[in-house]
Image (cartoon, rainbow, N blue to C red):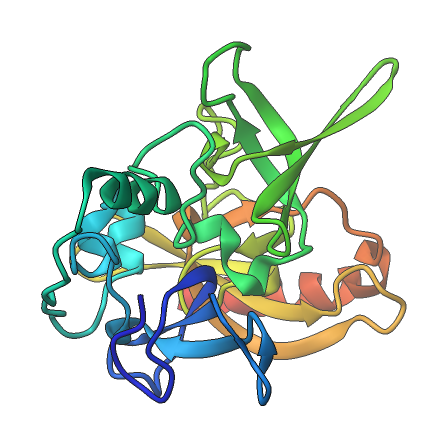
Amino acid sequence: MVVKGLIKNHGIVKDVELYHRCKSGMRVLVEFDFISAELGANPRQWIDYGWLRDPTTGLPLHARYPLGLRDARYWRPLKPIRAVSVPAPRSGDRTQQLENRTPPHPTQDFVDPFHWILDSRLDGKSFLARWEPSDHSEPAIKDVVVTPDCRINRVWVKKSGRHGSHRWKALPQEVSLPADPQKPIKPPTNTRPLLVVRGEHTGKHLRQIYFKSQKGTRERLITASVFEPWGMPEEARVEEHIVVGGKDCATVPSDPNKSRFEALMVSLRQIASQKRQR
């Protein structure tokens, strides 16, 4: 339910992203539930997250549908958002209708629009992850190739084996990192290309240069160059140097242009190593 702005109406959340121009620090793509001569049927509009409330309780969405600890830290409004009053339902039937439109959290098929894997910057980009069905009907599978599809709010999962590959659709909450819990990404030893999946650099493909220590902690950070468009003939180094945490990255399953940039990366790593030894 949108409670502020030019259009105040009910709608469905279709996408969400960090956006510094909004007071809340986030904006949400809402598909409205109405038809107009000017805007057509079910128009979509980007809305400040602070303008949205749950239609049954008047609470902000993160209060109505609490996220996990890690996601809650990332998808956190920059300012407190107050609840608003909502009209009391006229009958039990009306209450039931509203509950059906906004399913309680969590349910097996409920898709959290704020899930990190549905960030629009990851749409269509593949990386390695771990998959486990939400009903635990099958054992978890590590090192599968996952590709978020924000159009349908699902994740494509691909597993290769002796008899070919198998591909299926999964819920966002069924996918987790690291791809192999026994082998997390370690900045001092990582040699594989990466995709940033959380933080300000989300969606960027990296080749690691070196690693650096973080003051006051034992955590090591990754220093890397950004290459885009990944795997394409026109791929190029588009950013010389960024710093990210290993926990905010996932391994990229393939590197078609590895040989083209191998000499460059060897040179950059040698320079970084020499600077660290001084």
**Residue found at the very far front of the displayed protein:** 91
Task: Point out residue 269 in the picture as x, y percentages from the top left corner.
Answer: 60, 62
Q: Is residue 65 left or right of residue 185?
A: left
191 w.r.t. 234: above or below: above
Q: Relative to 157, is 91 on the left or the right?
A: left
Q: Mark yes or no: residue 159 visible.
A: yes
| Relative depth, front residue between 197 and 67 | 67
Q: Is residue 19 left or right of residue 105?
A: right
Query: What is the quadrant of the C terminus in the image?
Result: bottom left
Query: Would you say 167 lies left or right of 194 here?
Result: right
In what quadrant of the picture does the N terminus appear?
Answer: bottom left
Rendered residue at 75%/69% (across/down): 229
Q: Position of residue 121 (x, y in %)?
A: 56, 65
User: Looking at this view, is 237 or 178 the one in front?
Assistant: 178
- The residue located at (69%, 63%) in the rendering is 265
Res. 268 image quadrant:
bottom right
